[in-house]
C-alpha cells in the first residue's frame, strides 16, 4: 500500500511503500516556468539493503511505469487545458 508521506499544497506530494529491507519512494513536483507553463518532475527512489537487487530485477519496469505516468499526465493536462 502506498502512503502519502509529504504534501506541499499546490506544489508536490511524496508517497512511499515497502517493508523490511526495501522501500520505494515516489515524488511528484510542479514547477512554474517563465512563460506560464508548468513542468512536472517525477522521481522514484529504491532504498534499503535489498535496493540493489530490486533495482536489478525491476529497474526497467519501474522506469517504464514512471514514463507511462508522465505521458498519461501530459496527455490529460493537454486535453483539459483551460
Image: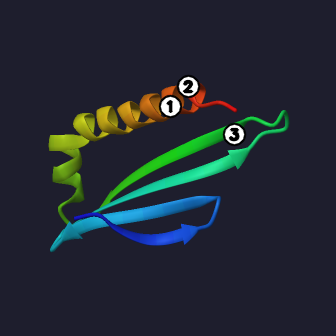
Residue 60 seen in render? yes
Along the viewing direction, whichever of 19 and 76 lies nearer the viewer: 76
For the residues bearing labels 2 and 1, Cβ distance under 8 angstroms: yes
Residue 55, given in percent of the width and then of the height, sits at 23, 47
Q: Could you tell me which quadrant the C terminus lies in?
A: top right
Question: Considering the image in quadrants, where does the N terminus appear?
Answer: bottom left
Q: In the drawing, does residue 24 fall left or right of residue 37?
A: left
Q: Secondary structure at mark 3?
A: strand
Q: Nearer the viewer, mark 3 or mark 2?
A: 2
Residue appearing at x 65%, y 30% in the figure: 81
Find residue 72 and report its horizontal and vertical position in percent.
Answer: 43, 31
The crowd level at tag 3 (other Cα within 10 Å; few <14, some 14-19, many 20+) is: few
For residue 72, above or below residue 48: above
Q: Position of residue 53 (x, y in %)?
A: 16, 51
**Closer to the observer: label 1 or label 3?**
1
Scheme of image coloration? rainbow
Q: Is residue 58 left or right of residue 5?
A: left
Q: Which residue is mark 1?
A: 76
Q: Is residue 48 visible?
A: no
At horizontal 37% and vertical 55% (from top left) the residue drawn is 45
> Are discs 3 and 2 less than 8 Å apart at CB?
no
Residue under label 2: 79
Query: Callout 1: few (<14), some (14-19), or many (20+) C-alpha neighbours within 10 Å?
Result: few
Residue in the foreground of this view, choosing between 58 and 32? 32
Amino acid at each position: 500500500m502506498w502512503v502519502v508521506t509529504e504534501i506541499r499544497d499546490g506544489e508536490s506530494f511524496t508517497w512511499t511503500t515497502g517493508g523490511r529491507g526495501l522501500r520505494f519512494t515516489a515524488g511528484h513536483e510542479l514547477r512554474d516556468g517563465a512563460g506560464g507553463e508548468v513542468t512536472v518532475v517525477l522521481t522514484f527512489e529504491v532504498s534499503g539493503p535489498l535496493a540493489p537487487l530490486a533495482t536489478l530485477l525491476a529497474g526497467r519496469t519501474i522506469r517504464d511505469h514512471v514514463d507511462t505516468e508522465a505521458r498519461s499526465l501530459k496527455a490529460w493536462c493537454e486535453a483539459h487545458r483551460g
